[in-house]
Image: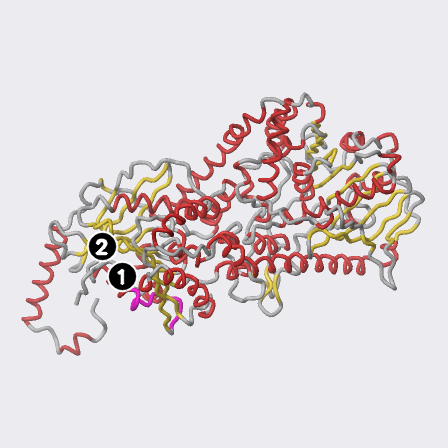
Amino acid sequence: MVSPGAEQRSGGSSPSMILKGIVLGLFLLARASAADEILSDTVPLTVDRPLDQMMVEGLNLFCLRELAASPRLRSERWKDDLVTGVTLEKSLTDHRNRFQSLIGAVDIRVTSHPLRPQDFELITTLNQSSIVAKSPGVTVHRVRWPVIEGVSAEGLLFVPRVIRAAVVALPDADWTPEMFSGLQQGLPETAQIVPRLAEAGCIVAIPMLLSRSDEYSGRSEIVFTNQPHREFLYRQAFEVGRHIIGYEVQKVLAATDLLEQLLKRLAPDQIGVHPKIGVIGFGEGGLLALYSAAIDTRLHTCWVSGYFQQRESVWQEPIYRNVWGLLTEFGDAELAGMIAPRRLILESCRAVEVAGPPHPRKGRTNVAAPGEIRTCPLESVQAELDRAKLFFAVHDKLDELTHIVSGENGDSSPGTEDALRAFTERLDVLEQLAQQPTPWATNSLQDRGPELVTRDAMAREKRQIDELQAHVQSLLLQSHQVRDARWRLDPAAIDEWKNQEPRLREWVHAELIGKLPHERKSPQARSRRILVNDAYVGYEIVLDVFEDLIAGGILLIPNNIKDGEQRPVVVCQHGLDGTPMDTISREAEHYRYYKSFSEELVKQGYIVYAPQNPYRGGDKFRKLQRMSNPLKRSLFSYIIAQHEQTLDWLATLPQVDSTRIAFYGLSYGGKTAMRVPPLVEKYNLSICSGDFTDWPRTMASNNEKFSYLFTSEYEVFEWNLAHVASYAELAMLMTPRPFMVEEGHRDGGQPSEWVAGEFGKVRRHYDQLGLVDRAVIEFFDGPHTIHGQGTFEFLRRHLNHPKFP
């Protein structure tokens, strides 16, 4: 393109200039003719659709198919355990331990220590008694109880005059304990079963659950968001191997500890050495009831209302229900099976439906993940119930699995009489169950009025959120000690490190990224020429990886490669919502970030490959992460397979020296630099631009403005990363291959001091192995962009490539 005014500055077009133009035009025409329309040993690429759209849509089909296959694979996994009731019982310890680990319920409960007795604590002040309500037979207290170090539960405790059994009752997340117990208006009478249980002789603990409100989801000095409280805690906890589900299950089990101790202490003559304890849950509480009873055999009976169904669409539910690896071993049927032969009542009823996160109010950012809760379809409930029956049948206890339908289609109110009677029967209080509870003689909530009651409930929730955040942030700050214990091996020589490294690489791939068990297809390479100029020719490439999953990108080949010559390859990776062409283009909107680094490098004589990665399309790609996590996979599980296929194909090209292939990525491409080359050894070196940092803290800190906690990138959270590997440890997996970081002081994300601190661990590792020149960092006074100075020299030196003029 000729810039405006060029003709005037040149003084017009002379005959010699016209002749030169004709010659240049003929030269470029000859180039275009000489460059094949397709690359040799490929077939024509004929589809007329954007590569990124085909890739994301294909991966969507792949993920849906994998989810649909997961029940069959779970059945195969449990098959040997389901031979007899004895074999099933023997297997359950390992299953339960793995399940507790998946939901992050791994901290020791302070209530479980036999030599340090704990108890329910009555919450009272000079102005307010712990007693909330009283009837002739029941007293209701406002209580707190310890759970794990630094974390407590708060709620209500219904204490009957005569104690016969105990219940942990779990409301939906949007119901307060006061609503659930009928002390405050808001729920249908059928759901207000707690007073009837208490009058029948059950001491009932009702913990408060974190709600779906966004009131406290943020910080005043940073920003407030529209994330539900459950998501705001989920994001922080996920990085340290904890979960809002796990924390609340721990609260249930801590209550079970205390109820068991209390029953034994107060009424040993009535209930013997094995107290009868049950758990009941509605909606979100139903999830917790199912999970808790699957873990703890002290819960004699379990009532799950409005939750149980096939779980292969969990990716469409709120993100705070996302559990890494869940569906590899545990659907709702398997969790029900872990309760067998104890009683399980499944009530199909109308759910507390959720259309999505809170609508963003003024002053709040719209960053919450999508996700909805709908009433469980009866056919889905029945299909999962049929699978659960196999577990009860092995014990010859099918009668202990009860399915009750509220209304004609399972869409009426919760709390059916049949479900209540089945639940109380196993607690031996059915005969004491009254049709209607006795009216309260006193109810302090009515005296305080709805505004004060709401204020008290919000203050209680704030205390609970603050406790959980403090626990998570403490784990986050201490996580480097856990990593150091595994990674600070201090090898004395390269050979010693090479013996240690494969085990670490395999562990990171399996536990952090997620490995795919599939065999890759033949690539069936397709190509078409899309770029021709006097320096290089460019081809769009598409390769098969798995069924419906493709890899692709743009291959740039210098025109000056001689016959028989082999050149090094630089793989140039785009960032979030980018395309390969962005790394080539000189248009301002792309050049400001990428500086046309693909084109600059091909002009320096490298072969350049710019891959398309699937992180494009907003929620269209983010839901792929949601689909994958329950199968113990991440987006990078597929990206690794795509890059492995690409490298194998590149190695077949006669111009490529497969021993000299480098990776260079910016932003999300920098994330790729930290997760693909460390695990794919065919990459000769890796350069991370604009992304290297203390990654766990950058992800989950609740007091840093650049934390991903406050962004819309809800897909980036990686299970237990803080205890597996930060960026320093991932970079160590490059050893002895060269590794470099490129970072602008005004990047806008991670601060330079965090980058330098994290890189110091990498440099120490390389230095101790005598590889001083192979770990390099370059800072520059610039923004989030390719700098292309020290990195280009790093490529030239370590790819043994001559310097082009």
Q: For residue 289, what is the image quadrant?
A: top right
Characterize the local packing of mark 2: few (<14), some (14-19) or many (20 or more) Cα atoms within 10 angstroms.
many
Task: Determine whether the residue tagged by mark 2 lies in a helix, strand or loop.
Answer: strand
Say if residue 521 shows up in the picture.
Answer: yes
Residue corresponding to mark 1: 795
Q: How is the image coloured?
A: secondary structure
- Circles 1, 2 touching at the beta carbon (< 8 Å): yes
Say if residue 577 shows up in the picture.
Answer: no
- Which residues lie in the magenta part? 782-791
- Quadrant (top left/top right/bottom left/bottom right) for the C terminus: bottom left
If you read the primary sequence from the N terminus, does the residue marked by circle 1 or circle 2 appear first?
2
Quick check: 268 above or below 682? above
Q: Position of residue 327 (x, y in %)?
A: 54, 37
- Please tell me which residue lies in front, 777 or 485: 485
Per the picture, the main secondary structure of the magenta-coloured stretch is loop
Quick check: 566 above or below 96? below
Residue corresponding to mark 2: 568
- Please tell me which residue lies in front, 737 or 413: 737
Quick check: 425 above or below 172? above
The residue drawn where x is 71% and y is 28% is: 402
Q: CA distance from mark 1 to mark 2?
A: 10 Å
The residue drawn where x is 45% and y is 68% is: 748
The residue drawn where x is 29% and y is 46% is: 647
- Quadrant (top left/top right/bottom left/bottom right) for the N terminus: bottom left
Q: Amino acid at mark 1?
A: Leu
Say left or right for 609 vs 13: right
